[in-house]
């Protein structure tokens, strides 16, 4: 029997306090990523700390506490509308993979982008695996 405290679904060890920290590259890109423009610019570099991930796997960045503005810029009236359309929220480097408003899960295109975001920014694989276990 393992002596470690096992986390979600027993897949990876739970490590309290392990959280992601923005990379220097993310901090450097923050100013241009978080400026909302029309049309909304996609974050093809996968450096966003906050934003929305479309059902097609396209990441759109916004500033902290600016999800409502991005929601509107993407053509939705409320967060419940954008989530019902299949978008996934990224807030403070945390992917909200359990929808609050719609009972649809994350699709393959979204998982692919989330995984690339983790790899691109050098975040721990075990953190990604814990996220996957939530779905």
Image (spheres, helix red, strand yellow):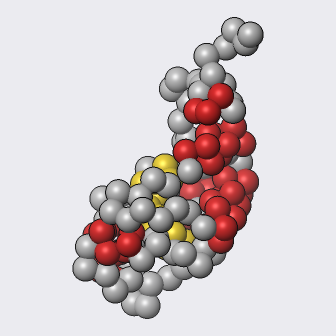
Q: Give residue 53's position: percent from left, percent from top.
A: 51, 69
* Relative depth, front residue between 109 and 28: 109
Q: Is residue 93 above or below residue 38?
A: above
Q: Residue at x 62, y 48 (%)?
A: 132
Looking at the image, which is closer to me, 94 or 34? 94
Percent x, y of residue 100: 35, 57
Quarter of the figure with residue 37 = bottom left
Q: Quadrant of residue 125?
A: top right
87 relative to 81 in the view: left or right: right
Which residue is at 43% across, 90% downward? 39
Image side of residue 87 versus residue 6, left or right: left
Q: Residue furthest front?
A: 103
Q: Position of residue 51 (x, y in %)?
A: 44, 65
Vertical placement of residue 50 versus 19, above or below = below
Asked if residue 113 lies left or right of residue 84, the reply is right
Q: Nearer the viewer, residue 134 or 78?
A: 134
Horizontal and vertical percent position of residue 74: 38, 83
Count of all numbered marks drawn on residues in the image: 0
Q: Quadrant of the N terminus?
A: top right
The residue furthest left is 77
Q: Is residue 43 visible?
A: no
Q: What residue appears at the point 42 percent right and 62 percent down from the top-left corner?
A: 103
């Amino acid at each position: 029997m393992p002596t470690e405290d096992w986390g979600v679904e027993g897949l990876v060890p739970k490590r309290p306090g392990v959280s992601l920290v923005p990379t220097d590259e993310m901090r450097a890109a923050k100013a241009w990523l978080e400026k909302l423009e029309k049309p909304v610019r996609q974050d093809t570099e996968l450096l966003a700390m906050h934003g929305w991930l479309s059902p097609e796997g396209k990441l759109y960045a916004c500033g902290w506490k600016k999800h409502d503005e991005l929601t509107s810029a993407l053509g939705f009236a409320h967060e419940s509308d954008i989530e019902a359309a299949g978008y996934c929220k990224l807030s403070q480097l945390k992917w909200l993979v359990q929808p609050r408003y719609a009972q649809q899960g994350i699709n393959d295109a979204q998982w692919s982008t989330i995984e690339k975001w983790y790899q691109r920014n050098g975040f721990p694989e075990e953190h990604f695996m814990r996220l996957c276990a939530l779905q």
